[in-house]
Image (spheres, rainbow, N blue to C red):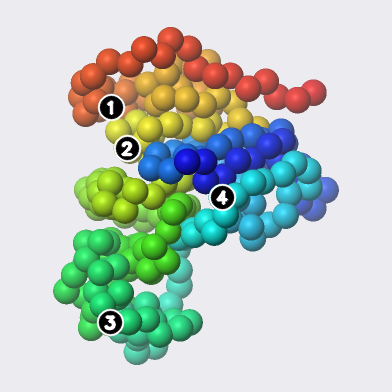
Amino acid sequence: MRLIAAEGLAVRMGGTEVLHDVSLTLERGEIVTIVGPNGSGKSTLLRVLIGALRPTRGRITRAAGLRIGYVPQKLHIDPTLPMSVARFLNLPRRRPAAALRAALEEAGLPDLRDRQMADLSGGQFQRVLLARALLERPDLLILDEATQGLDQPGSAAFYRRIAEVRQEMGCAVLMVSHELHVVMSASDRVICLNGHVCCEGHPEIVAQAEEYRALFGTGTHGALALYRHEHSHSHDHDHPQPHEAAE
């Protein structure tokens, strides 16, 4: 089932065209990761897809009744403000206790309902943000560099949880990530963005694409080795799908 289809998206901000000729689709149940250098328009594209920003050109088609859960890069909460995890999850509207309990269990934090937000570790804080997104019972879960600031074990554990959530809930996951080793091991499909879609496809294929290597170099063989280790089955794809930049 197709959740979102975007065709020919362009976004102009402050006289600069941040995105142009971006087309993509998201299907239920798949994990798709967007990679690209700083300033390539990754977060802008997410904002367009969730409806927070209107594109200058192009169109987006969303499945009827599409529910989206969103996990931001960071969220600042005043550490002097007394706020428990349960109280945070009940903003802006109160939720049934059973719903809070289920969302925390799905995020991997079953026992932190009464803990103060200010006392959480970085990984726990991000999982509370994940629990908040899961309260919406999303068809599509969107994460904008949600592991920024976590160490590598914490980041890997978070993404393992995301894969479990996808399996348990059947939702699609769209991630922006700068952690190429995670991308290769956790994604069904990778979209390489640099103002436009440079290439997209299966992670192993994208890693071999000239457009990808021009942006990230050839030093991603470690990520590819990890990917091959975790996905030992072979794939029949031979070529990435390049997207030419518009003149």
Whether the residues at callouts 3 and 2 have beta carbons within 8 Å, the answer is no
Q: Nearer the viewer, mark 4 or mark 2?
A: 4
Q: Can residue 153 be seen in this view?
A: yes
What residue did someone put label 3 on?
97
Q: Disc 4 on helix, strand or loop? A: loop
Determine which of the numbered discs, if any, sits on residue 227 in the image.
1
Q: In this view, does 175 lie to the left or right of 65?
A: left
Quarter where residue 219 is shown: top left
Report the Cα–Cα distance between label 4 and label 2. 25 Å
What amino acid does circle 2 point to?
A: Ala
- Alpha-carbon neighbours of circle 1 within 10 Å: few (<14), some, or many (≥20)? many
Percent position of residue 103, x then y: 29, 68
Determine which of the numbered discs, if any, sits on residue 245 in the image.
none
Quarter where residue 71 is shown: bottom left
Percent position of residue 81, x then y: 39, 88
Percent position of residue 224, x then y: 32, 23
Q: Disc 1 on helix, strand or loop? A: helix
What residue did someone put label 2 on?
186
What amino acid does circle 1 point to?
A: Tyr
Report the Cα–Cα distance between label 1 and label 4. 32 Å
Q: Is residue 17 left or right of residue 3?
A: right
**Of marks 4 and 2, which one's residue comes earlier in the chain?**
4
Q: Is residue 219 above or below residue 167?
A: above
Give the residue drawn at x 64%, y 52%: 48
Name, please, the residue furthest toward the top: 238
Report the Cα–Cα distance between label 3 and label 2. 32 Å
Q: Which of marks 4 and 3 is in front?
A: 4
